[in-house]
Image: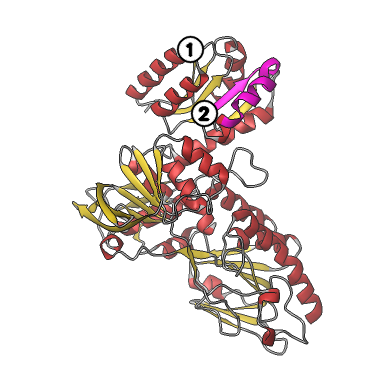
Amino acid sequence: MSDPMILLVTAENEEVLRAQFGRYAAEYAVTVAPSLEEGVALIRRAEEEGAPLALMVLDTTLPTPSLKHALHEQRALVPTARRLAVTPWPRFLEHAQALRHKVAMGAFDAHLLMPRGVRDEEFHSAVVELLNEWTATIAAPQVETVRIIAPPGEPVARELHDYLFRGGTPHGVHPPGPGDVGPYPQVVTQDRPPRHVPDVRTLARELVGRSDAASLADVDEVLDVVVVGAGPAGLAACVYAASEGLTTLALEAGAVGGQAGSSSMIRNYLGFPRGISGMRLSTRARSQAIRFGARFFPGWEAEELVPGEDGAPHRVRTEAGELLARTVVVATGVAYRRLGVPELEELVGRGVHYGAAMTAAREMEGQDVVVVGGGNSAGQAAVHLARFARSVTIAVRRPDLRSTMSAYLITEIAANPRITVEGSTRVVDGGAEDGDLAWLELERDGSRERRPVQGLFLLLGAEPHCEWLPDAVRRDAKGYVLTGRDVPGEDWRGGLPPAELETSVPGVFCAGDVRSGSMKRVASATGEGAGVVSRIHEHLARTD
């Protein structure tokens, strides 16, 4: 395959843009077109030669009849490419006002001021971010740290693939060769021969966390903080606790990043004007926490919490043994609810997916897809799937998305010609052909319609899973953990409620989506994870 292409569409500013994008020429085919029409011809020629379009840079001073027409043409031609608009300084304020709504609708990934000199690193940081996200979500990996060997459609291999993708690990999935022997999936890493990996937790323990149970059992000191769950709230708690000198250890049963780690693009997170994928956000947060000394054990589940009494440490029981901790942060997040249609539950991994399933998006090229759910995760999944699928239908039980989804996503969805929203609609049946999802039956206003569908992505709201917590940790009627003044009065101590974010058990705290009354947003979860550390300090000061 040829190098991916960066296409510069410009008439007046070719010299400036060629000079600026020269630094990418070693790894990308940097090409210039003086008009949209010639740019489209170059894109088609590159596709025939197997060179994908990674980035299109559109000079907004182009003498085209309609910039909107130009954007529509490019978006329809290569929806997987990233789109960057650039404007020279004399016309930037004028064009920024005119194009502001186009950026909000997703017509551009960014609108930037054209550099006026050398080493404009602010400009290039934006370019690198766009190329980085394109490489992570679209391009095939050039280096494979891990190889998964399995027959096509093998369900565990798909789960391993999704886990490695969410962790940012370069990998590939390959069919068995003449010398390969099952059982499958087999996993190959640089330092070990092929071996059977039966589930995600085994892979997590080997690659990301410690490689055996004994290493977790070797943690025999009394820790200041054990964080259970490494989603946004847990990661923030790790960063702030470790940075303030507290001995911090995190357990995560699945992928670091939790549910947010599967989000294709979070655009309303503070400090990331061009958005950031959940995978990038979580891997950066984990690296930040490790820098301060936090330890992570992915693939390990907390099986039981035994509260300490009379000043004794709390005990967090795992398959490998007990961890002793002066404080515990419950940040286990939530899981998507099941659809409850038996015929479709049998097709999970074969066209039916719970969560955003970023790795499955590429397989939806040219297919018809249904996303069930009305929250931000569903909207982000739909926008990402629309880069590949022929059509994306968002099915939601409410009449529309206004009460459950952020306005910026609603705007972007409305502007995307590949996405439609069907309110007051639910999936009631489905079936397969040749083992994979082939059709769904949707119900609306009492009538049913059967339609061909090759992908179903279920983001159905959330359920907490707190079975490992003792009854002493009070929960609300839906199973979410109660904290602070929400704790029943009979569990207050000395007539005073627990501290903010503290549960009914002293020294056991809760942050993020699993907490009763939380906002169920990434930013609020990270805020709670950071804020809980001050409460931990207060507790430790009282008990020292």
Give the x, y percent position of residue 234: 61, 63
| Residue most extreme to the front | 445
- Give, as a three-letter code, the residue at label 2: Arg
Residue visible at 35% across and 54% down?
158
| Tag count | 2
On screen, residue 543 versus residue 407, left or right, reads right
Q: Position of residue 505 (x, y in %)?
A: 66, 81
Q: Position of residue 512 (x, y in %)?
A: 61, 64
The magenta stretch spans which residues? 84-101
Q: Quadrant of residue 185?
A: bottom left
The residue carrying mark 1 is 35
User: Looking at the rendering, in which quadrant would you find the C terminus?
Assistant: bottom right
Image coordinates for residue 287, horizontal then vertical, percent = 62, 53
Identify the residue position indicated by label 2 in the image: 83
Q: Secondary structure at mark 1?
A: loop
Comparing 81 with 158, the one in front is 81
